[in-house]
Amino acid sequence: MDVVQALAIAGSTAFLGLILELVRRGALAAKYSLVWLVCGIVLLILSIWRSVLHALAAWLGIHYPPAFLLLVLVGFVSGGSLLFTVALSRHRAQIDRLTEELALLNARLREDRSTTSRADFHR
Amino acid sequence: MDVLIVNDASEDDTVAVVPGLGVRWLDLSVHLGVGGAVRAGLRYAHESGYEFVVRIDADGQHRPDDIDSLMAPVINGQADAAVGTRHAHGSHPGAKASLKRFFQWLLGAWLGLLTGHRVTDPTSGFWAFGREAIAFLAASHPSGYPEPELMLLLRRERLRVTEVPIQMRERLAGESSLTFPRIGLALACTLVASVVVPLRARRRL
């Protein structure tokens, strides 16, 4: 086992551990951890079984196998970012909606109160 | 006529001043930007059963004197929405041939090309809406810098939009939210909208 492989295995393991720890602490929702967990597992598999990495790289016509590892990583990172901007947009829409509803509710409450107090006054 | 003020999480004295004015108001607890504020106001109008809504900027640039002429085509049933334009007869007195003005012209020309209707003031925030437009926009008024997209959206929904010439004053307070980098962003967002809006399914027929 050379240094690159040891580093790759250690890196992927640490990454997986970090993701699991974040989920355990509740800092990362399980739903959003899936992309990263799959990414970590794939990277771990490819760093342990170099034959798989080499075979896949050769099949794709990549002469330098570690470049394939980077390709996988870039794929996951872009996919993840896209998913998260989608989630972010949905959350923004939800916040907008909630803020509007809250403002309307407050106004209704305020107006109801003022009409009731006026009614009391006239009684 | 009832007046509704939408306070989009202002950090100035708005919260203290508004309750003393004897008008209705909405307090947004999180800053949403023009689009969300207008949507909230329209939702209020829709739920309360108002027939007509005039949206007017709070910085004093729009003259309340123009409200009658702005509302006229909507009240007469000639249009579902009317937008005030300060460039109906070329430029207004205060207009300078600036880069900003050029971008606005470009935006207007692009919207005109897409909708097949003349758009002389694409970023105008002075609008009158009729019942149908209120019902539709209460749920789907665009966010962000919404005016150009609003033009596209209303046409897409086959609502009739008409332009009404208005006079603009110098703003009494505050600064334009359309600063230079933002007008670029607004332009880019409008370009995206002009591709996406026609592809979206119509929500009503």
Image (cartoon, rainbow, N blue to C red):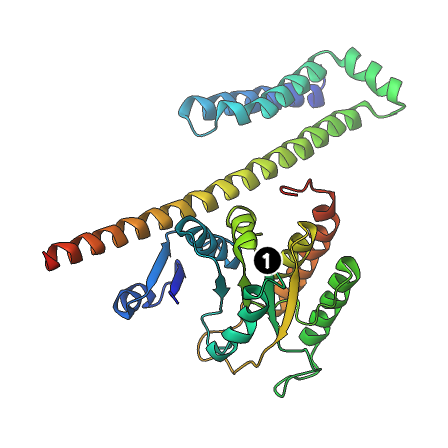
Residue at horizontal 65 percent and vertical 52 percent from the top: B153
Considering only vertical position in the picture, is B62 above or below B153? below
Query: Dot 1 corresponds to which residue?
Result: B146
Q: Position of residue B200 (x, y in %)?
A: 69, 42
Quadrant showing the C terminus of chain B? top right
Residue at horizontal 49 percent and vertical 68 percent from the top: B56
Front residue of B27/A92: it is: B27
Q: Position of residue B126 (x, y in %)?
A: 55, 69
Snapshot quadrant of residue A62: top right
Q: Residues within 10 Å of mark 1 (few under 14, many from 20)?
A: many
B158 lies left or right of A103: right
Q: Amino acid at mark 1?
A: Pro
Residue at horizontal 71 percent and vertical 46 percent from the top: B196
Considering only vertical position in the picture, is B99 above or below B152? below
Quadrant showing the N terminus of chain B? bottom left
The reply to whether residue A6 is in sight is no
A52 lies left or right of A111: right
Considering only vertical position in the picture, is B97 above or below B85? below
Extreme residue toward the left, this view: A123
* Numbered-mark total: 1
Circle 1 sits in a helix, a strand or a loop, which is it? loop
Front residue of A40/B48: it is: B48
B139 lies left or right of A52: left
Q: Position of residue A39 (x, y in %)?
A: 64, 23
Q: Position of residue B188 (x, y in %)?
A: 70, 57
Extreme residue toward the front, this view: B76
Front residue of B38/B67: it is: B67
The reply to whether residue B61 is in sight is yes
Snapshot quadrant of residue B103: bottom right
Residue at horizontal 67 percent and vertical 18 percent from the top: A42
